[in-house]
Image (cartoon, rainbow, N blue to C red):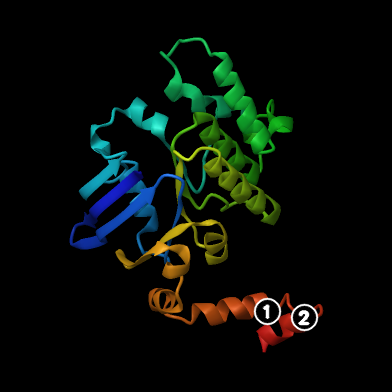
Amino acid sequence: MSLLTIRELTVQYGTKKILDGVGLTLEQGRWLMLVGPNGAGKSTVVNAVTQGVPYAGRIELLGRDVRRYKPRALAQRVGVLAQSHAVSYSFTVEEVVRLGRYAHAAGVFSARGAQDDHKVEQALALTGLLPLAGQSVLTLSGGELQRTFLAQLLAQDPQLLILDEPTNHLDLVYQKQVFTLLTDWLRADQGRAILSVVHDLSLARAYGTDALLLDAGRVRAAGRVDEVFAAAHLDAAYRMDVSAWMRRMLGQWAGPSGRGMRSLMA
């Protein structure tokens, strides 16, 4: 079943079209990677889905226009992780993660239940934040802060995750852990799906099931990852031989130490 459907999505500022007739379908159990060069309109798609920008066209969640959802009902079904987070309050990590349960509360002053505690603890454990649960978010590194808001998202327990560069501030170890964690989250419930903006084509190809390639606000290619990542599509969007560049970059790891780097610099 389609979890998210976008039809003829157009975003325009004055005479400039940021998105021009973009469409996509995201089925349950799938992970769609939104890729393309800088300025292609990837983050604008995310902003439109989350009702952050005015748009023409139609966006449906579970067959229903997202504009018809009340904010609380939408928050129970959709969770969003932005590229970066600015915090100016001294909440602890656990308190920030617990905010993810707000959409499921019966009321503003309702007491938290056992289910809330379980979801919060589970999210802290999955993101490796249990040791930092009592620490102020003002003391965290960029990577730790990103994992905190990812944990908040997991505690929210939505059906659809929307991620804008989810590992933007994370080192290699946590990039691998986060993408593996998200894969496990997706597989744990076939009613879920993920839409993510990813600049790293290697990560997108390794973890995505589907992809949509944007080029100057229009869809260059859409479908299964291997189909979208065909050389003809990528080369046209990025105006370069993407496959050759990727092979050259990865080639430095193939031989004895240093040999690959010398060939790369040649």
Q: Residues within 10 Å of mark 1 (few under 14, many from 20)?
A: some
Secondary structure at badge 2 equals loop
Q: Is residue 174 left or right of residue 62?
A: right
Residue behind mark 1:
251
Rendered view: 254 above or below 55 = below
Q: Are marks 2 and 1 in contact (CB under 8 Å)?
A: yes
Closer to us: 68 or 159: 159
Point out residue 128 in the picture as x, y percentages from the top left corner. 69, 38
Q: Residue at x 71, y 78 (%)?
A: 252
Residue behind mark 2:
255
Which quadrant is home to the N terminus?
top left
Secondary structure at badge 1 equals helix
Rendered view: 211 above or below 262 = above
Which quadrant is home to the C terminus?
bottom right
Closer to us: 188 or 98: 188
Rendered view: 101 above or below 88 = above
Point out residue 65 in the picture as x, y percentages from the top left corner. 24, 39
Q: Residues within 10 Å of mark 2 (few under 14, many from 20)?
A: few
Q: Is residue 191 left or right of residue 150?
A: left
The amino acid type, in three-letter code, at marker 2 is Gly
Q: Residue at x 57, y 47 (%)?
A: 183
